[in-house]
Amino acid sequence: MTPRTLRVLAALAGALSCTGCSGWQSALDAHGLQAAHLLRLITFIVVVCTVVWILVLGALAVALWRRRSGPSEPSDTGPAVERRLTVAVSSAVAVTAVVIAVFTAASYQTTRALSDLPSDALTVKVRGYQWWWEVSYQDPQSGRTLPSANEIHVPAGRPVRFVLEAADVIHSFWVPSLAGKQDLIPGRTNEIAIMAQRAGIYRGQCAEFCGLQHAHMAFMVIAEEPAQFEAWATAQLQDAAAPTNPEQERGRQIFLTKACAACHAIRGTPAAGTTGPDLTHIASRSTIAAGLLDTTRGSLAAWIADPQTLKPGNNMPMVPLAADELRAVSAYLASLK
Ligand code: CUA
């Protein structure tokens, strides 16, 4: 095997196993009810088309073979041959019409199945921004709203209804292992249903080109056992953790007095900005900047120090901070589990 072949194979294996993203992302590996419907449809269409392709090529091969030993003038045929040809072409047209009709019916049925939602669905509102996802949970009992960003926890085995909106341009919500795509369009509300059949981390991706950082607009859907999901929701409803050492306390003060609090909210503090992601429990999320960096104190510091180099064009400005201020703010944010 040449080095080039090896590189191609390695790239293919990487694409299939999703190396480099901490979550599974493949429409061919369905873990959701809706994705399973879509996978069945595409498998059916691919199998039928493959059979048709093999039949057509087989017929072509037979025709070429006969042509070798046939008459020198193939169009010079008698009425019997004409009749046979008419029957053959008419049958092929009829079969084609039937295949297309069956495909149409199968697609229609799949679309119906996708929108067929049980009524006990959990509702999650997702709003697309350049380039991150605002997530909020509506609790019908308490009426409370639980805000988050870029990471969507859902209970496994329970349907979830996503209400999709966009703040600026058109985005598209796509978790290949769980369901199909649905656009987020400014000025209108779309919906998509998802039901994760088993617990797991499923990577999602904006699937509509939405500007410079479209490729850095990822999110995670974390499907958990219902009890685990409830525990997560209860923890997320709490206000932000109080600082536990002087450095974190200083970081909190700097966060509240510098520009940070104008754009970000931290519940339990005066910070109530709504331009950027809610940071109340930022350290409980596995990544920051919509899947760009793992959440560590170091990456938080790097992001605050220079967001434009890490993700050019995003709306986070560079807030001038001295080195010790940067250390304190990152220490505080990293403590917000
Ligand atoms: Cu948002 Cu592409």
Image: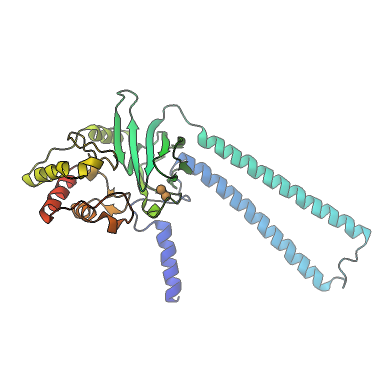
Residue 45 horizontal/vertical position (percent): 60, 49
Residue at 52% from the left image edge and 44% from the top image edge: 38
64 relative to 84 in the view: left or right: left
Q: Residue furthest right?
A: 79
Residue at 43% from the left image edge and 58% from the top image edge: 16
Task: Name the quadrant of the N terminus.
Answer: bottom left
Task: Name the quadrant of the C terminus.
Answer: top left
Q: Is residue 100 above or below residue 164?
A: below
Residue 27 horizontal/vertical position (percent): 47, 49
Residue at 48% from the left image edge and 44% from the top image edge: 181
Q: Is residue 2 above or below residue 142?
A: below
Decide if residue 164 is in sight here: yes
Q: Nearer the viewer, residue 288 or 309?
A: 309
Residue 173, picture quadrant: top left
Residue 51, picture quadrant: bottom right
Residue 305 horizontal/vertical position (percent): 20, 55
Decide if residue 223 is in sight here: no
Q: Nearer the viewer, residue 148 or 84?
A: 148
Q: Residue furthest bottom?
A: 2
Residue 79 horizontal/vertical position (percent): 93, 58
Q: Residue furthest left?
A: 246
